Image: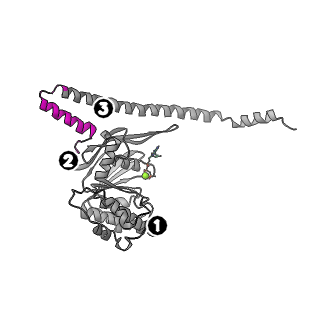
Amino acid sequence: MATSKKTQTKKVKKFKHKPQQTKEIKAEEHRLNNLKRKEAKEVKNKRRKDLANLKKVWKTNIKNATSKNQKKELKENYTRFFKDGYTQNTPGNIVDVQNVTKFYVTKRIYEKVLDNVSFQIKEGEICVLLGASGSGKTTLLNILSGLANSDSGHAIVLGRDLYFLNEKKKTKFRKDNISFVFQSYNLIQSLTVLENIKTGFALRNKKDKHQMNLDEILKVLGLEQVKDKYPYQLSGGQQQRVSIGRALAKNPKILFADEPTGALDEQKGREILEFLYQINKKYGTTMIMVTHNPNIALMANHVIKVKSGHLVEEIHNKHTVNPKEIKWA
Ligand SMILES: Nc1ncnc2c1ncn2[C@@H]1O[C@H](COP(=O)(O)OP(=O)(O)OP(=O)(O)O)[C@@H](O)[C@H]1O
Ligand SMILES: [Mg+2]
Protein backbone atom coordinates (compact mmCIF):
# COMPACT_ATOMS: atom_id res chain seq x y z
CA MET A 1 0.00 0.00 0.00
CA ALA A 2 1.37 3.36 -1.01
CA THR A 3 1.93 5.87 1.81
CA SER A 4 1.02 9.51 1.30
CA LYS A 5 3.70 12.24 1.42
CA LYS A 6 2.24 13.54 4.69
CA THR A 7 2.59 10.16 6.49
CA GLN A 8 6.16 9.81 5.21
CA THR A 9 7.18 13.11 6.78
CA LYS A 10 5.47 12.12 9.99
CA LYS A 11 7.34 8.83 10.03
CA VAL A 12 10.70 10.52 9.56
CA LYS A 13 9.95 12.96 12.37
CA LYS A 14 8.94 10.11 14.64
CA PHE A 15 12.21 8.32 13.86
CA LYS A 16 14.19 11.41 14.80
CA HIS A 17 12.71 11.46 18.29
CA LYS A 18 15.30 10.65 20.92
CA PRO A 19 14.55 7.99 23.55
CA GLN A 20 13.37 9.40 26.86
CA GLN A 21 16.52 8.19 28.67
CA THR A 22 18.90 10.08 26.34
CA LYS A 23 16.87 13.20 26.90
CA GLU A 24 17.22 12.86 30.66
CA ILE A 25 20.97 12.26 30.44
CA LYS A 26 21.34 15.32 28.23
CA ALA A 27 19.32 17.42 30.68
CA GLU A 28 21.50 16.22 33.58
CA GLU A 29 24.68 16.98 31.63
CA HIS A 30 23.34 20.43 30.86
CA ARG A 31 22.52 21.04 34.53
CA LEU A 32 26.00 19.92 35.66
CA ASN A 33 27.72 21.99 33.02
CA ASN A 34 25.80 25.06 34.15
CA LEU A 35 26.86 24.40 37.74
CA LYS A 36 30.50 24.07 36.71
CA ARG A 37 30.30 27.17 34.57
CA LYS A 38 28.95 29.00 37.60
CA GLU A 39 31.91 27.71 39.64
CA ALA A 40 34.36 29.04 37.04
CA LYS A 41 32.62 32.40 37.09
CA GLU A 42 32.69 32.51 40.89
CA VAL A 43 36.42 31.74 41.00
CA LYS A 44 37.13 34.49 38.50
CA ASN A 45 34.94 36.97 40.40
CA LYS A 46 36.57 36.07 43.72
CA ARG A 47 39.99 36.67 42.19
CA ARG A 48 38.88 40.02 40.84
CA LYS A 49 37.49 41.00 44.27
CA ASP A 50 40.63 39.85 46.13
CA LEU A 51 42.75 41.90 43.80
CA ALA A 52 40.54 44.98 44.16
CA ASN A 53 40.73 44.64 47.96
CA LEU A 54 44.48 44.29 47.89
CA LYS A 55 44.77 47.42 45.75
CA LYS A 56 42.47 49.26 48.12
CA VAL A 57 44.73 48.41 51.09
CA TRP A 58 47.77 49.69 49.20
CA LYS A 59 46.01 52.89 48.19
CA THR A 60 44.94 53.54 51.77
CA ASN A 61 48.54 53.01 52.89
CA ILE A 62 49.73 55.46 50.25
CA LYS A 63 47.09 57.98 51.35
CA ASN A 64 48.08 57.62 55.01
CA ALA A 65 51.80 57.90 54.38
CA THR A 66 53.46 60.07 57.01
CA SER A 67 55.99 61.75 54.76
CA LYS A 68 56.38 62.73 51.12
CA ASN A 69 59.27 60.31 50.76
CA GLN A 70 57.31 57.41 52.20
CA LYS A 71 54.41 58.21 49.87
CA LYS A 72 56.76 58.27 46.87
CA GLU A 73 58.31 54.96 47.86
CA LEU A 74 54.94 53.27 48.41
CA LYS A 75 53.70 54.56 45.05
CA GLU A 76 56.77 53.19 43.30
CA ASN A 77 56.35 49.82 44.98
CA TYR A 78 52.68 49.81 44.01
CA THR A 79 53.60 50.27 40.35
CA ARG A 80 56.38 47.70 40.54
CA PHE A 81 54.03 45.13 42.03
CA PHE A 82 50.71 45.67 40.24
CA LYS A 83 51.88 47.01 36.91
CA ASP A 84 55.27 45.37 36.39
CA GLY A 85 54.58 42.26 38.45
CA TYR A 86 57.83 42.49 40.44
CA THR A 87 57.83 40.26 43.47
CA GLN A 88 60.17 37.67 44.97
CA ASN A 89 60.53 33.97 44.44
CA THR A 90 60.92 31.79 47.51
CA PRO A 91 64.62 31.35 48.41
CA GLY A 92 66.59 29.25 45.92
CA ASN A 93 63.75 28.96 43.41
CA ILE A 94 63.14 30.67 40.10
CA VAL A 95 59.61 29.34 39.61
CA ASP A 96 56.92 29.33 42.29
CA VAL A 97 53.54 27.97 41.26
CA GLN A 98 50.92 28.68 43.89
CA ASN A 99 47.47 27.08 43.67
CA VAL A 100 47.15 27.54 39.93
CA THR A 101 43.76 26.70 38.47
CA LYS A 102 42.75 27.00 34.84
CA PHE A 103 39.36 26.53 33.19
CA TYR A 104 38.34 26.30 29.62
CA VAL A 105 34.73 27.21 29.12
CA THR A 106 33.52 26.85 25.57
CA LYS A 107 29.94 27.08 24.36
CA ARG A 108 29.05 23.50 25.06
CA ILE A 109 31.60 22.15 27.49
CA TYR A 110 33.33 23.19 30.66
CA GLU A 111 36.70 21.82 31.65
CA LYS A 112 38.90 22.39 34.69
CA VAL A 113 42.24 21.77 33.00
CA LEU A 114 44.45 22.54 36.03
CA ASP A 115 43.20 22.18 39.57
CA ASN A 116 45.02 23.91 42.41
CA VAL A 117 48.54 23.03 41.25
CA SER A 118 51.53 24.13 43.39
CA PHE A 119 55.28 23.45 43.12
CA GLN A 120 58.68 25.14 42.90
CA ILE A 121 61.56 24.86 40.45
CA LYS A 122 65.18 25.61 41.34
CA GLU A 123 67.66 27.44 39.18
CA GLY A 124 69.74 25.05 37.03
CA GLU A 125 67.28 22.14 37.24
CA ILE A 126 66.08 19.92 34.47
CA CYS A 127 62.42 19.71 35.36
CA VAL A 128 60.10 17.35 33.51
CA LEU A 129 56.32 17.74 33.41
CA LEU A 130 55.11 14.19 32.94
CA GLY A 131 51.60 13.02 32.13
CA ALA A 132 49.27 11.35 29.64
CA SER A 133 47.75 13.14 26.69
CA GLY A 134 45.21 15.74 27.80
CA SER A 135 46.49 15.88 31.39
CA GLY A 136 47.28 19.61 31.17
CA LYS A 137 51.06 19.64 30.56
CA THR A 138 51.08 22.13 27.68
CA THR A 139 48.60 24.36 29.50
CA LEU A 140 50.90 24.40 32.54
CA LEU A 141 53.98 25.09 30.39
CA ASN A 142 52.12 27.94 28.67
CA ILE A 143 51.21 29.50 32.02
CA LEU A 144 54.82 29.24 33.27
CA SER A 145 56.16 30.85 30.12
CA GLY A 146 53.59 33.65 30.03
CA LEU A 147 51.78 32.38 26.95
CA ALA A 148 48.53 31.78 28.87
CA ASN A 149 46.92 33.11 32.05
CA SER A 150 45.80 31.18 35.10
CA ASP A 151 42.27 31.78 36.36
CA SER A 152 43.31 31.66 39.98
CA GLY A 153 46.59 31.21 41.81
CA HIS A 154 49.96 32.66 40.89
CA ALA A 155 52.89 31.72 38.69
CA ILE A 156 55.94 33.64 39.90
CA VAL A 157 58.75 33.21 37.41
CA LEU A 158 62.15 34.92 37.69
CA GLY A 159 60.81 37.38 40.24
CA ARG A 160 57.70 38.33 38.25
CA ASP A 161 54.12 37.47 39.10
CA LEU A 162 52.90 36.81 35.56
CA TYR A 163 49.29 37.42 36.55
CA PHE A 164 49.95 41.15 36.82
CA LEU A 165 51.62 41.56 33.44
CA ASN A 166 49.61 42.75 30.47
CA GLU A 167 50.23 41.14 27.06
CA LYS A 168 52.86 43.71 26.06
CA LYS A 169 54.82 43.19 29.27
CA LYS A 170 54.50 39.44 29.00
CA THR A 171 55.93 39.59 25.47
CA LYS A 172 58.87 41.58 26.76
CA PHE A 173 59.29 39.15 29.65
CA ARG A 174 59.47 36.23 27.19
CA LYS A 175 61.82 38.11 24.88
CA ASP A 176 64.23 38.97 27.70
CA ASN A 177 64.23 35.70 29.60
CA ILE A 178 63.07 32.57 27.88
CA SER A 179 63.40 30.35 24.82
CA PHE A 180 61.15 27.64 23.41
CA VAL A 181 61.77 24.37 21.67
CA PHE A 182 58.63 22.90 20.12
CA GLN A 183 57.74 19.46 18.85
CA SER A 184 57.40 20.83 15.32
CA TYR A 185 60.72 22.79 15.19
CA ASN A 186 59.13 26.06 13.90
CA LEU A 187 62.13 27.04 11.77
CA ILE A 188 62.01 29.80 9.17
CA GLN A 189 62.06 27.90 5.89
CA SER A 190 63.57 30.72 3.81
CA LEU A 191 66.62 31.03 6.11
CA THR A 192 69.66 28.76 6.32
CA VAL A 193 70.71 26.91 9.47
CA LEU A 194 73.12 29.67 10.42
CA GLU A 195 70.58 32.42 9.71
CA ASN A 196 67.91 30.63 11.74
CA ILE A 197 70.27 30.41 14.71
CA LYS A 198 71.20 34.07 14.26
CA THR A 199 67.55 35.05 14.78
CA GLY A 200 67.94 33.78 18.36
CA PHE A 201 71.27 35.52 18.71
CA ALA A 202 69.68 38.85 17.79
CA LEU A 203 67.37 38.54 20.79
CA ARG A 204 70.04 37.86 23.39
CA ASN A 205 70.61 40.06 26.37
CA LYS A 206 73.77 41.87 25.33
CA LYS A 207 74.82 42.62 28.91
CA ASP A 208 75.08 38.94 29.76
CA LYS A 209 78.69 37.85 29.75
CA HIS A 210 78.24 34.10 29.85
CA GLN A 211 77.21 33.58 26.30
CA MET A 212 77.88 30.92 23.75
CA ASN A 213 79.03 32.33 20.45
CA LEU A 214 77.67 31.13 17.11
CA ASP A 215 80.66 28.91 16.34
CA GLU A 216 80.38 27.22 19.72
CA ILE A 217 76.67 26.56 19.21
CA LEU A 218 77.26 25.06 15.76
CA LYS A 219 80.05 22.91 17.19
CA VAL A 220 78.17 21.75 20.30
CA LEU A 221 75.17 20.77 18.19
CA GLY A 222 77.21 19.22 15.36
CA LEU A 223 75.78 21.58 12.76
CA GLU A 224 78.99 22.98 11.25
CA GLN A 225 78.71 20.84 8.12
CA VAL A 226 75.12 21.87 7.40
CA LYS A 227 75.21 25.53 8.41
CA ASP A 228 74.43 26.79 4.89
CA LYS A 229 71.62 24.35 4.21
CA TYR A 230 67.91 25.20 4.35
CA PRO A 231 65.52 23.42 6.76
CA TYR A 232 63.92 21.31 4.00
CA GLN A 233 67.37 19.86 3.24
CA LEU A 234 67.76 18.54 6.80
CA SER A 235 66.57 15.48 8.68
CA GLY A 236 64.07 15.85 11.53
CA GLY A 237 66.82 15.43 14.14
CA GLN A 238 68.99 18.07 12.48
CA GLN A 239 66.04 20.49 12.29
CA GLN A 240 65.36 19.99 15.98
CA ARG A 241 69.05 20.65 16.70
CA VAL A 242 68.77 23.94 14.79
CA SER A 243 65.74 24.92 16.86
CA ILE A 244 67.74 24.13 20.02
CA GLY A 245 70.63 26.19 18.60
CA ARG A 246 68.29 29.12 18.03
CA ALA A 247 66.91 28.75 21.57
CA LEU A 248 70.41 28.64 23.07
CA ALA A 249 71.73 31.55 20.99
CA LYS A 250 69.37 33.74 22.96
CA ASN A 251 71.08 32.61 26.14
CA PRO A 252 67.78 32.19 27.99
CA LYS A 253 67.39 32.02 31.74
CA ILE A 254 64.86 29.23 31.22
CA LEU A 255 64.51 26.95 28.22
CA PHE A 256 61.01 25.56 27.74
CA ALA A 257 60.52 22.48 25.60
CA ASP A 258 57.17 20.91 24.72
CA GLU A 259 57.69 17.27 23.65
CA PRO A 260 60.93 18.17 21.82
CA THR A 261 61.39 14.57 20.68
CA GLY A 262 57.75 13.93 19.80
CA ALA A 263 58.37 14.02 16.05
CA LEU A 264 61.58 11.99 16.11
CA ASP A 265 62.48 8.32 16.10
CA GLU A 266 64.23 6.79 19.10
CA GLN A 267 67.79 7.34 17.92
CA LYS A 268 67.28 10.98 16.94
CA GLY A 269 65.17 11.67 20.00
CA ARG A 270 67.83 10.27 22.28
CA GLU A 271 70.48 12.36 20.51
CA ILE A 272 68.44 15.56 21.04
CA LEU A 273 67.89 14.81 24.72
CA GLU A 274 71.59 14.15 25.14
CA PHE A 275 72.34 17.60 23.71
CA LEU A 276 69.92 19.19 26.16
CA TYR A 277 71.36 17.15 29.02
CA GLN A 278 74.95 18.17 28.17
CA ILE A 279 73.99 21.83 27.77
CA ASN A 280 72.35 21.80 31.18
CA LYS A 281 75.44 20.22 32.71
CA LYS A 282 77.87 22.57 30.96
CA TYR A 283 76.03 25.90 31.13
CA GLY A 284 73.55 25.33 33.97
CA THR A 285 70.57 26.42 31.85
CA THR A 286 67.29 25.72 33.65
CA MET A 287 65.10 23.50 31.49
CA ILE A 288 61.41 22.80 31.83
CA MET A 289 60.37 20.03 29.52
CA VAL A 290 57.08 18.30 28.76
CA THR A 291 56.91 14.60 27.97
CA HIS A 292 54.53 11.67 28.25
CA ASN A 293 57.41 9.15 28.32
CA PRO A 294 58.24 8.13 31.93
CA ASN A 295 61.68 6.87 30.84
CA ILE A 296 62.70 10.34 29.68
CA ALA A 297 61.94 11.61 33.19
CA LEU A 298 65.06 9.76 34.42
CA MET A 299 67.29 12.50 32.95
CA ALA A 300 65.55 15.12 35.12
CA ASN A 301 66.50 16.40 38.56
CA HIS A 302 62.86 17.09 39.24
CA VAL A 303 59.76 15.32 37.92
CA ILE A 304 56.25 16.73 38.24
CA LYS A 305 53.56 14.19 37.44
CA VAL A 306 50.24 15.57 36.23
CA LYS A 307 47.02 13.62 35.89
CA SER A 308 43.70 15.13 34.78
CA GLY A 309 44.88 18.59 35.81
CA HIS A 310 46.14 17.53 39.26
CA LEU A 311 49.70 17.32 40.48
CA VAL A 312 49.79 13.69 41.61
CA GLU A 313 53.46 13.18 42.45
CA GLU A 314 56.73 15.08 42.67
CA ILE A 315 60.07 13.29 42.46
CA HIS A 316 63.53 14.74 43.15
CA ASN A 317 66.10 12.46 41.54
CA LYS A 318 69.37 12.38 43.45
CA HIS A 319 71.08 10.91 40.41
CA THR A 320 70.10 11.69 36.87
CA VAL A 321 70.62 9.35 33.93
CA ASN A 322 72.29 10.41 30.68
CA PRO A 323 69.68 9.97 27.92
CA LYS A 324 72.03 7.70 25.99
CA GLU A 325 71.63 5.15 28.79
CA ILE A 326 67.85 5.42 29.05
CA LYS A 327 65.69 2.56 27.83
CA TRP A 328 63.28 4.37 25.48
CA ALA A 329 60.12 2.27 25.60
N1 LIG B 1 42.24 26.46 23.91
C1 LIG B 1 41.56 25.47 24.49
N2 LIG B 1 40.21 25.52 24.58
C2 LIG B 1 39.51 24.54 25.19
N3 LIG B 1 40.08 23.45 25.75
C3 LIG B 1 41.41 23.33 25.67
C4 LIG B 1 42.24 24.33 25.04
N4 LIG B 1 43.54 23.94 25.12
C5 LIG B 1 43.54 22.75 25.77
N5 LIG B 1 42.27 22.40 26.10
C6 LIG B 1 41.89 21.18 26.84
O1 LIG B 1 42.65 21.13 28.03
C7 LIG B 1 43.05 19.81 28.33
C8 LIG B 1 44.55 19.78 28.55
O2 LIG B 1 45.20 20.13 27.35
P1 LIG B 1 46.78 20.18 27.20
O3 LIG B 1 47.07 20.59 25.80
O4 LIG B 1 47.34 21.01 28.28
O5 LIG B 1 47.16 18.65 27.45
P2 LIG B 1 48.55 17.91 27.28
O6 LIG B 1 48.81 17.20 28.56
O7 LIG B 1 49.58 18.84 26.78
O8 LIG B 1 48.19 16.83 26.15
P3 LIG B 1 49.12 16.27 24.94
O9 LIG B 1 50.09 15.31 25.56
O10 LIG B 1 48.12 15.57 24.07
O11 LIG B 1 49.78 17.42 24.26
C9 LIG B 1 42.59 18.94 27.16
O12 LIG B 1 41.47 18.21 27.56
C10 LIG B 1 42.24 19.92 26.08
O13 LIG B 1 41.17 19.48 25.34
MG1 LIG C 1 50.67 19.04 24.97
Residue at image mark 3: 51
Spot occupied by residue 264 in the image (x, y as percentages of width and height): 44, 64
Q: Is residue 98 left or right of residue 23?
A: left
Can you tell me whether the CB of the residue at mark 3 lies under 8 Å from the nearest atom of ligand 1? no
Measure the C-alpha gap from mark 2 to mark 1. Answer: 46 Å
Q: Which residue is mark 2?
A: 91
Above-or-below relation of 163 to 266: above
Please state the extent of the stretch shown in magenta in the rendering. Answer: 63-89
Q: Nearer the viewer, residue 152 or 216?
A: 216
* Secondary structure under the numbered disc 1 in the rendered image: helix
Q: How is the image coloured?
A: one colour
Q: Quadrant of the N terminus?
A: top right
Distance in Å between CA atoms under marks 1 and 3: 50 Å
Q: Amino acid at mark 1?
A: Tyr
- Mark 2 or mark 3: which is in front? 3
Residue at disc 2, secondary structure? loop
The three-letter amino acid code for the residue at tag 2 is: Pro
Looking at marks 2 and 1 on the same chain, the residue that comes earlier in the sequence is marked by: 2
The vertical placement of 32 against 179, above or below, is above
Which residue sits at x=41%, y=65%? 239
